[in-house]
Image (cartoon, helix red, strand yellow):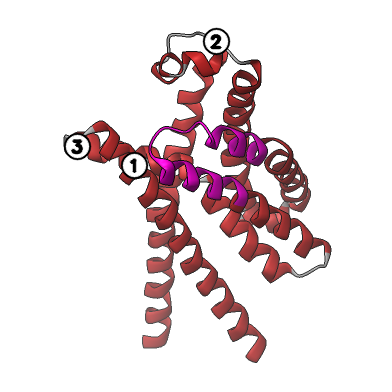
């Protein structure tokens, strides 16, 4: 009876932890999508566009920007589907096809346009270098996610796609940190730089934590 009660409490704790993690992730992901859609009015009145008016005068940068934010919107929403256990088990075709589109979008649109735009990113040399790293890391992790699932290595596929998703989610976590530091009345440039670094490094650490948990669960099952 005691073991049964402990198991129930453990299950409740896991469920609460998942809610605590996924509710904010879903909310802020959808909020990012909602706030990005107005850019497709192609208005020049957005502050980001006004600050970079000379860059937006160049067709390559102009279309790279719109392709990049479109790819970002899709990848963030598609990722939410990819990590649904229900869809993976009962609607496997949705997982497969949304995964294929995610990989296509990252490799051919999201990462390449992100790499190009990183050369013109706001901030110092180190912020531009970080954006370059993000684009390359996003591309490589997604590529290895594709490669490993073709080899039918499911665990490795999960590991690489968690890393890919963590990099995609920097667009969301950056804005969360930016809002928090804005409320704390931090200097705009300082806020921008620190929010960027915390978002990238923090997401990578969180990804490695989930990877550790996945690997531990797999090894436990394997040994049994």
Of residues 13 and 46, the one nearer the viewer is 46
Dot 1 falls on a residue whose secondary structure is: helix
* Quadrant containing the C terminus in the rendered view: bottom right
Q: Is residue 46 above or below residue 89?
A: above
Residue drawn at x 65%, y 21% is: 60
Residue at which label 3 appears: 186
The residue indicated by pointer 1 is 193
Q: Give percent across and percent down for residue 129.
A: 49, 46
Q: Which residue is mark 2?
A: 41
Locate residue 70 relative to residue 22 in the image: left or right: right
Label 3 element class? loop
| Local secondary structure at mark 2 | helix
**Quarter of the figure with residue 63:** top right
Task: Tell me: 188 left or right of 124.
Answer: left
- Mark closest to the chain's N terminus, 2 or 3: 2
Is 113 included in the stretch rendered in magenta? yes
Tell me if residue 123 is in the magenta stretch.
yes
Place of residue 64 in the rendered image (x, y in percent of width and height, measured from the top left): 63, 26
The reply to whether residue 1 is in sight is no
For marks 2 and 3, give the CA distance: 31 Å
- Residue at 39% x, 44% y is 196
- Residue at position x 43%, y 9% in the image: 45
- Closer to the camera: disc 1 or disc 2? 1
Q: Residue at x 72, y 48 (%)?
A: 99
Q: Nearer the viewer, residue 29 or 85?
A: 29
Which circle marks residue 109 in the picture? none
Position of residue 4 relative to residue 51, above or below, is below
Do residues under tags 1 and 2 come within 8 Å of each other at their CB atoms?
Answer: no
Q: CA distance from mark 3 to mark 1?
A: 11 Å
* Magenta region, residue range: 110-136
């Amino acid at each position: 009876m005691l073991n049964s009660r402990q198991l129930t409490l453990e299950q409740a704790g896991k469920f609460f932890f998942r809610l605590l993690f996924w509710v904010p992730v879903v909310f802020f992901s959808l909020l990012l999508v909602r706030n990005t859609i107005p850019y497709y009015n192609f208005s020049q009145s957005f502050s980001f566009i006004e600050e970079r008016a000379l860059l937006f005068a160049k067709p390559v940068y102009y279309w790279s920007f719109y392709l990049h934010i479109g790819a970002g919107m899709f990848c963030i929403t598609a990722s939410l589907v990819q990590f649904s256990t229900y869809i993976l088990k009962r609607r496997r075709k949705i997982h497969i096809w949304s995964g294929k589109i995610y990989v296509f979008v990252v490799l051919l649109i999201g990462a390449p346009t992100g790499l190009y735009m990183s050369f013109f990113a706001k901030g110092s040399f180190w912020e531009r270098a970080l954006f370059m790293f993000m684009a390359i890391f996003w591309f490589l992790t997604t590529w290895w996610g594709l490669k490993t699932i073709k080899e039918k290595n499911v665990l490795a596929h999960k590991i690489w796609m968690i890393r890919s998703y963590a990099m995609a989610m920097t667009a969301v976590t950056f804005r969360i940190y930016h809002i928090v530091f804005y409320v704390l009345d931090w200097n705009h440039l300082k806020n921008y730089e620190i929010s960027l670094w915390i978002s990238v490094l923090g997401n990578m650490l969180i990804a490695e934590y989930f990877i550790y948990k996945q690997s531990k669960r797999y090894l436990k099952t394997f040994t049994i």
